[in-house]
Amino acid sequence: MNRSAELFLEAVIKYKSIAIYIPGSPDPDAIASAYAIKIILKYLGIKSNIFAENKLSLPQNQAFIDSLEIPVVFGQNVNPKKYQAYIVPDYQNNRV
């Protein structure tokens, strides 16, 4: 296992529930990253949900989510008390 994977595992293994939060309008990279994290957490026995701050801005992004059946909750309805930690996947925004 490489060092990055070891550090990730050390960071998350102590939690039972983690929110995966995508700021702004999610692009395909952020969606894919969030989904990959969710799958890894599930494998580790950690419950997680993916949240996106804003709705999708492009129809092809909705098609991407629909075709892969990626469970994303849109809006700011995150109850932080339900989760022990959070992860923000890398994403691009128009300010970069």
Image: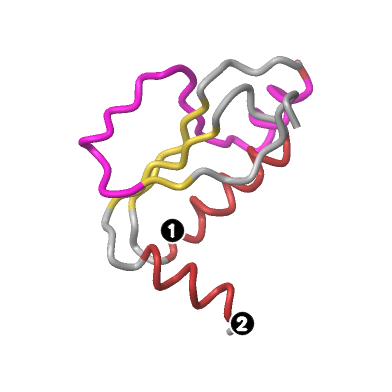
The 10 Å Cα crowd at callout 2, few under 14, some 14 to 19, many 20 or more, is few
Q: Residue at x 55, y 73 (%)?
A: 5
Element type at marker 2?
Answer: loop
Q: Residue at x 40, y 73 (%)?
A: 10
Which mark identifies residue 2? 2
Q: Nearer the viewer, mark 2 or mark 1?
A: 2
The 10 Å Cα crowd at callout 1, few under 14, some 14 to 19, many 20 or more, is many
In 3D space, how far apart are the residues under numbered discs 2 and 1 (Cα atoms)?
A: 18 Å
Extreme-front residue of the structure: 95
Q: Report the side of 17 relative to 41 (left or right).
A: left
Q: Residue at x 56, y 17 (%)?
A: 54
- What amino acid is at disc 2? Asn
- Please tell me whether residue 4 belongs to the stretch shown in magenta: no
Extreme-bottom residue of the structure: 1
User: Percent position (x, y) of residue 26?
Assistant: 64, 28
User: Percent position (x, y) of residue 29?
Assistant: 72, 41
Task: State how the image is colored.
Answer: secondary structure
Front-most of 55 and 95?
Answer: 95
Front-most of 52 and 39?
Answer: 52
Q: Is residue 89 placed above or below 65 in the rendered structure?
A: below
Q: Report the side of 59 relative to 2 (left or right).
A: right
- Range of residues picked out in magenta: 60-85
Which mark identifies residue 83? none
Image quarter of residue 4: bottom right
Mark closest to the chain's N terminus, 2 or 1:
2
Image quarter (top left, top right, bottom left or bottom right) of the N terminus: bottom right
Q: Report the side of 34 relative to 32 (left or right).
A: left
- What amino acid is at disc 1? Leu
- Please tell me whether residue 82 belongs to the stretch shown in magenta: yes
Which mark identifies residue 41? 1
Extreme-left residue of the structure: 81
